[in-house]
Amino acid sequence: MTVKLIAMTCGWINGDLGVFLAGETGQIRIPVPAYLIEHPKGRVLFDTGLHPDTQGDLRHRVGSLADAFSVVFRPGEEIEARLEALDIAPESIDYIVNSHLHWDHTGGNELIPNAKVIIQKREWEAGHVAELIEANSFIPANYDHGHQVMQIDGEHDLFGDGSVVTVPTYGHTPGHQSLKVRLQSGGEVVMAADACYMRKTLEDLHLPTILSDAEQMTASLMTLRKLQTAGARILFGHDPEFWRSVPRAPLEIT
């Protein structure tokens, strides 16, 4: 069985470092990753990056979040264009596994019309309750597009063979999830997404300021540590230094 994993950059976000590592000062530019998994039984995207509208009037798309962030996002960096550069039609994607519902992880969902969205039940529910939408800075225009949605609870083996498995990593948002992939080499890779922004987040348990539950997020980091100890490679969610070392499309992660 051949499982391919390809990383793509779908824009960059500028903001205060203290947002991503509480107490730190200065500015940082972070990558916005998305990943393609090609499995004999289907194609999967783990997150979809930014919406093309953010290339223009950011405030129109994200509201008051534009006070805290700016983006560097050029035509050709959208998830649709990234796939087409690999000769993959966006319509051919079978599944979108969204780590969570934030704007930089679901913005491209609209461009992937035929996929079934796989998301934690508690996250999807939080994305449809007014007070939780506001508390978590969710923007329904990024994720309410009429996709078929599978709401899961905890781990979910997408293809039933242990090769693509969701890992519940709650805390950044109510139902955040990471994704574990077993490659052809037999090695495992865990795309942590915002359960672990930076290498320093995992090494020092240095939490960000954006989170819904610090205790849950710390427990999720301990889960990632256990997976790392067992031999899995952790792909940190928004670490620009780490991202420089990640092979990106058209190269595979091996």
Image: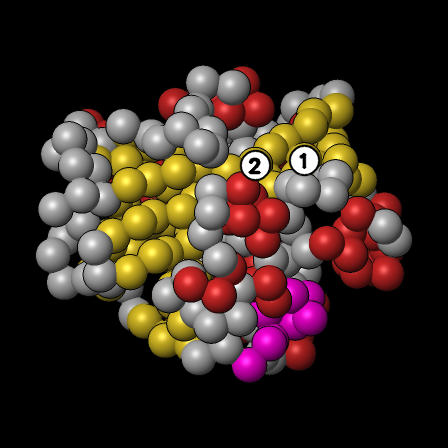
**Rendered position, 27 above or below 112:** above
Mark 1: secondary structure: strand
Report the residue marked by disc 2: 9
Q: Can residue 236 be seen in this snapshot?
A: no
Quadrant placement of the C terminus? top left
Contact, CB < 8 Å: mark 1 with mark 2? yes
Gap between marks 1 and 2 measured at Cα: 8 Å
Residue 225: x and y, percent? 28, 33
Q: What is the magenta segment's predominant secondary structure? A: loop
Furthest-front residue in this view: 87
191 on left or right of 18: left
Name the front one of labels 1 and 2: 2
82 on left or right of 74: left
What range of the chain is rendered magenta?
139-146
Residue 3: x and y, percent? 23, 44
Residue in the image at 38% along x and 64% along y: 95
Report the residue marked by disc 1: 12
Residue 6: x and y, percent? 39, 38
211 on left or right of 234: right
Residue in the image at 45% along x and 52% along y: 88
At label 1, the amino acid type is Trp
Mark 2: secondary structure: strand
